[in-house]
Amino acid sequence: MKIGIIGAGNIGGNLTRRLTALGHDVSVANSRGPQTLKALAEETGATPVTVTEAARDAEVVVITVPVKAVPDLPSGLLDGAAPGAAVIDTGNYYPRERDGRIAGIEDEGLTESRWTERQIGHPVVKAFNGTFAQDILERPRPAGDPDRMALPVAGDDEAAKRRVRDLIDALGFDTVDAGGIDDSWRQQPNTPVYGLRAGVDAVTGALAEASPERTPEFRG
């Protein structure tokens, strides 16, 4: 499968490593240009590209950049993606540590991923946002293993969500359907499921325990 990854930080880099190891055709981009991705490309066999090129013909696109950087992504970024492409949003809103105050999230009450959808003009599937990057490399387990971790996955497009869940399964993790994008507050930072290393039952329970109220440290 052709996969485009925008953002080559901890999550983007480790997804590049794992997805190329599974045999996928991965293009990876960052804000500094493909020349800065030479080492990652040599390690993994991924193709370093510009951000504008990353989604071209991709069946899955991973956007893993700081939330504050989402509006700076090129206009029409996803126009060249494959029809029905699934777009994964791994982002988290950290208003005090990194992103500053974002009015759409704070004043309109949008979930982080709904706000991201509005910026890029394309539906997203929220996944990997509460996953420790090193776990992508170190904690895959075969299906049925009692120690297999589960990841929450939220999205409105059921076909796209199914594609993402299948991909996560191939990466060595179970998934839990966390509902639509308007429900994705259940997996935002400082919720019980955020950073949880556990199986399906515990992740399901943690999603149910979440509160929609942002705690003060996660308000701008």
Image: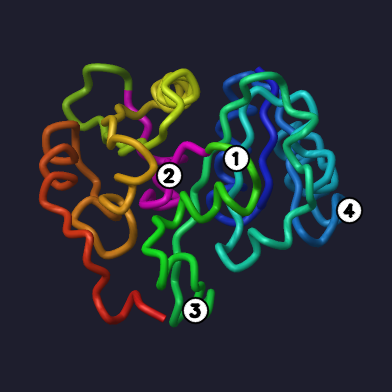
Disc 4 or disc 1, which is closer to the eye?
Answer: 1
* Disc 4: which residue: 35
Describe the element under mark 1 as helix, strand or loop: strand
Q: SS class of the residue under badge 4?
A: helix
**Amino acid, disc 1:** Val
The residue positioned 26% from the left and 31% from the top of the image is 176
Nearer the observer, disc 1 or disc 3? 3
Figure coloring: rainbow
Mark 2 and mark 3 residues within 8 Å of each other at the beta carbon: no
Instruction: Give coordinates of residue 214: x percent, y percent.
Output: 27, 70
Kindly report the distance in space between the C-alpha atoms of the residues bearing marks 4 and 2.
26 Å
Q: Classify 10 Å Cα crowding around label 2: few (below 14), some (14-19), many (20 and above).
A: many
The correct choice, above or below, for 97 with respect to 211 in the image is: below
The residue labelled by disc 3 is 101
Q: Earlier in the sequence, mark 4 or mark 1?
A: 4
Residue corresponding to mark 1: 62
Q: Nearer the viewer, residue 196 or 183?
A: 183
Residue 84 to residue 153: above or below: above
Tags 4 and 2 touching, CB below 8 Å? no
What amino acid is found at the position of numbered circle 4 in the picture? Gln
State left or right for residue 219 relative to residue 64.
left
For marks 2 and 3, the one nearer the N-term is 3
Quadrant that contains the N terminus: top right
Q: Which residues are magenta?
A: 124-141
Q: Quadrant of the C terminus?
A: bottom left
Callout 3: SS: loop
Q: Is residue 174 above or below residue 97?
A: above
